[in-house]
Image (tube, rainbow, N blue to C red):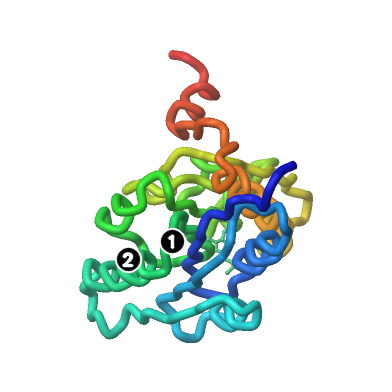
Amino acid sequence: MSGPVARRRVAVLVSGRGSNLGALLAAARAPDCPAEIVLVLSNNPDAGGLALARAAGVAAEAIDHRPFKGDRAAHETALDARLRAAGTEIVCLAGYMRRLTPFLVNAWAGRMLNIHPSLLPAFPGLDTHARALAAGVCLHGCTVHLVTEGVDEGPILAQAAVPVLPGDTEAALAARVLAQEHLLYPAALRMVAGGTAPPPADPAAALAALLPRP
Ligand code: GAR
């Protein structure tokens, strides 16, 4: 007979509407989910994700970056303190649009996940859907990866691909990718929290394997 599943304490950092947070919250309601969302933090007091979390009965707080007047280390120290006070074991960035310094990245190394709206290592950074359309790629998608010091460079945990269709607009492509994000992030968190994640892939090695040898 197996007892209740051990649940890892997860905090989610958001900056905006929080639809990925919504998917994580919904997935964590399953009794067999090895992750429990215990805290949502935002640098933006107006983030929709904060209201979403509160409606789900999850502690949610804004730690506005603006009063820190560009002192990223001090802002991250405040975030880190709150994460630790909540007994956080895993941090999920879900549309958290602040670049992190090595301080917070290293404090949570191996325990901080991010979702990015492209098939990394293609299209790191912003405006991924417009850039995918401009590049004429046939496949696009999303990636969940561990956060490291390089932006969108960390080891890949999971990816989902979607086709780019003739006549696609940026909005249509973004919506197709977002639907996959909502499936991929809960699945990846479930693997990490449950200790069943395969060893992450090194994106540079994955790219090298795809490129023709000189
Ligand atoms: C998502 O598409 C996520 O992949 C992206 O921001 C959106 C947030 O939407 N993240 C990044 O671009 C990070 N570089 P959401 O607030 O509805 O989850």
Occupied quadrant, residue 137: top right
| Residue 150 image point, x, y percent | 34, 47
Seen in the image, is 173 located left or right of residue 155? right
Q: Residue at (46%, 66%) from the top-left corner?
A: 96
| Residue 102 image point, x, y percent | 26, 53
Placement of 61 over or under 152, stated as above or below: below
Q: Residue at (35%, 64%) from the top-left corner?
A: 84
* Kind of residue sitting beneath label 1: Thr
* Ligand 1 positioned in quadrant: bottom right
Seen in the image, is 140 located left or right of residue 81? right
Seen in the image, is 50 located left or right of residue 85? right
Q: Which residue in the protein does label 1 denote?
A: 88
As measured in the structure, the alpha-carbon distance from the residue carrying label 2 to the one carrying label 1 is: 10 Å
Q: Which residue in the protein does label 2 denote?
A: 80
Residue 134 seen from this side: no
Q: Residue at (70%, 64%) from the top-left corner?
A: 29
Nearest the eye: 139 or 9: 9
**Mark with earlier residue (2, 1):** 2
Where the N terminus falls, by quadrant?
top right
Q: Residue at (38%, 51%) from the top-left corner?
A: 151
Count neighbours of disc 2 (C-alpha within 10 A) and say few if under 14, some if 14 to 19, many if 20 or more: some
Say what secondary structure mark 1 lies in. loop
Nearest the eye: 5 or 180: 5
| Residue 10 image point, x, y percent | 51, 60
